[in-house]
Image (cartoon, rainbow, N blue to C red):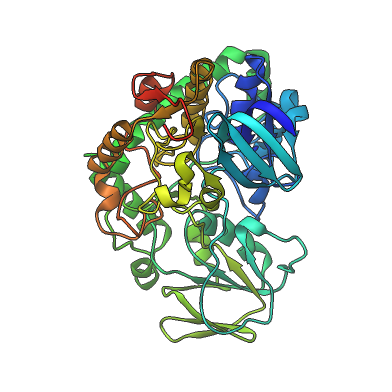
């Protein structure tokens, strides 16, 4: 059986960040990745129009600049290439096409079963992400053509000249619709609820700008600092007193792009600004005004051979269904595969919603750290900022594990959960969003503050809330 000091599960942004820190510390480690390539969500999401909605030069590791991004908001393929380059120094430690099947705490370490064999690790780091399991429409009937989720895109699906139905108008929906409208014979967009959409302001970088970034790296440093400051200010517009003014800007964008009052009314959100994810697009509204594109402000309710049926009773004959319907975000499948102290399964511990102290450490699971999991993402800024802080937290905790297994106290975990809930305001204001666990009503995905606050508080390990585990039953 292979034995390592640290096993990392996942080779997306979080797993690669952790691997690079482990390599720098000369730790023995391995990264398990179920996909045939690295990249996590950027490996999975290859649908037409996929791009980041955080400026490219902020959506990256703080110590690895990439002057060659082609646009202010990088296309998905460029982000994947960036991540592959960042992972190159640790690529020999990454086991691709290797799925975690089971992990059990044995009193002093983790016994791990994978699709390619067994291994043992003193420390287990879950970097599996939260946007991994697509949510497909669960409706009656049968459609006899292709149904493809945006996160499982298939290039063999014929889009050019086809009649396409897009189900969902979230982040991937507003990106894919304009691209499909350019290629398809017709597009029907089934909208369960209208999102708030802000202008994105995307543009291509001129060759001269890219050359300047390459020749003067300090300019990229200054740009990143500026983007960080500007983006942190957006927090108040999502969860603070600035929401009213931001809402008016979004509605002004809608009014400017959609002069037809009937279409505009259908595209006007009915929920509180910030309760759901605020989206960015420069061309979504324009696409909906094209003569061969139709917005249906009703949810999908049934499939029929060659057609979809909406909640308003309308029936639409189509050739292809594109499901832009998001993910199972609050219930992570890996949780059923991890057994901690005293036989506790992580899915049981999370039966009322995910929880972790500092968004990273879980009571009852010694020497387990979770990256990009409970309350570890942002509604206003780059998730990579949070990932780096968590990776630093784990890296600085590792020396303490040489004294014995570490486990965070139940009191510290509960106090953190209570703090998150008290600060979650707008996200628990009543609208249906993917941040709130349906079982408990707790907001379990977003950090309810600015990125810098999290980095200051949890970018390093503090042993105070932890105790050493002396035996399997301790």
x, y (%) of residue 61?
A: 57, 25
Question: Residue at horizontal 69%, vertical 30%?
Answer: 30
x, y (%) of residue 317?
A: 60, 84
* 105 vs 328, nearest the viewer: 105
x, y (%) of residue 452?
A: 38, 24
* 404 vs 274, nearest the viewer: 404
x, y (%) of residue 97?
A: 75, 46
Whether residue 82 sits left or right of residue 395 in the image: it is: right
Question: Residue at horizontal 49%, vertical 16%?
Answer: 400
Q: Relative to 37, does residue 83 appear above or below in the rendering?
A: above
Q: Relative to 160, does residue 470 appear above or below in the rendering?
A: above
Quadrant position of residue 210: top right
Question: Residue at horizontal 49%, vertical 53%?
Answer: 171
Which quadrant of the rendered structure holds the N terminus?
Answer: top right
Which quadrant of the rendered structure holds the C terminus?
Answer: top left
* 376 vs 233, nearest the viewer: 376
Number of marks present in the image shown: 0
Report whether residue 37 is seen: no
Q: Relative to 250, does residue 306 appear above or below in the rendering?
A: below
Whether residue 245 sits left or right of residue 158 in the image: it is: left
Report whether residue 89 is seen: yes
Question: Residue at horizontal 41%, vertical 73%?
Answer: 297
Whether residue 216 sits left or right of residue 259 in the image: it is: right
Q: Relative to 260, does residue 363 appear above or below in the rendering?
A: above
């Amino acid at each position: 059986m292979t034995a390592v000091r640290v096993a990392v599960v996942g080779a997306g942004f979080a797993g690669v960040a952790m691997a690079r820190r482990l390599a720098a510390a000369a730790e023995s480690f391995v990264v398990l990745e179920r996909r045939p390539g690295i990249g996590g969500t950027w490996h999975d999401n290859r649908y037409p129009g996929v791009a980041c909605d955080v400026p490219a030069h902020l959506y990256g590791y703080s110590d690895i600049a990439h002057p060659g991004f082609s646009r202010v908001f990088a296309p998905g393929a460029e982000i994947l290439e960036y991540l592959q380059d960042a992972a190159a120094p640790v690529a020999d430690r990454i086991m691709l096409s290797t799925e975690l099947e089971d992990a059990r705490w044995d009193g002093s370490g983790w016994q791990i079963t994978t699709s390619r064999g067994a291994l043992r690790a003193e420390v287990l780091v879950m970097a599996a992400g939260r946007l991994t399991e697509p949510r497909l429409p669960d409706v009656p009937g049968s459609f006899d053509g292709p149904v493809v989720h945006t996160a499982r895109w298939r290039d063999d699906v014929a889009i050019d000249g086809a009649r396409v139905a897009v189900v969902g108008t979230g982040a991937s929906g507003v990106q894919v619709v304009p691209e499909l409208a350019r290629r398809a014979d017709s597009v029907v967009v089934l909208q369960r609820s209208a999102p708030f959409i802000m202008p994105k302001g995307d543009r291509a970088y001129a060759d001269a700008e890219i050359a300047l970034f390459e020749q003067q790296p300090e300019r990229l440093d200054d740009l990143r600092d500026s983007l960080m400051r500007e983006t942190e200010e957006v927090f108040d517009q999502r969860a603070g007193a600035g929401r009213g003014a931001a809402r008016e800007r979004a509605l002004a964008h809608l009014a400017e792009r959609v002069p037809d009052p009937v279409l505009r009314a259908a595209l006007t959100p009915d929920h509180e600004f910030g309760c759901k994810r605020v989206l960015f697009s420069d061309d979504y509204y324009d696409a909906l005004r094209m003569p061969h594109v139709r917005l249906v402000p009703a949810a999908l309710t049934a499939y029929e051979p060659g057609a979809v049926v909406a909640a308003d009773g309308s029936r639409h004959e189509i050739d292809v269904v594109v499901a832009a319907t998001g993910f199972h975000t609050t219930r992570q499948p890996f949780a059923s595969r991890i057994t901690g102290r005293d036989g506790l399964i992580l899915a049981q511990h999370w039966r009322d919603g995910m929880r972790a102290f500092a968004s990273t450490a879980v009571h009852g699971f010694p020497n387990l750290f979770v990256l990009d999991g409970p309350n570890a993402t942002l509604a206003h800024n780059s998730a990579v900022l949070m990932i780096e802080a968590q990776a630093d937290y784990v890296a600085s905790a590792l020396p303490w594990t040489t004294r014995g297994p570490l486990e965070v106290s139940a009191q510290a975990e509960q106090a953190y959960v209570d703090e998150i809930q008290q600060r979650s305001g707008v996200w628990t204001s009543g609208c249906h969003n993917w941040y709130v666990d349906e079982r408990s009503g707790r907001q379990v995905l977003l950090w309810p503050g600015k990125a810098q606050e999290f980095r200051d508080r949890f970018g390093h390990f503090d042993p105070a809330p932890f105790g050493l585990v002396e035996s399997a039953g301790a």
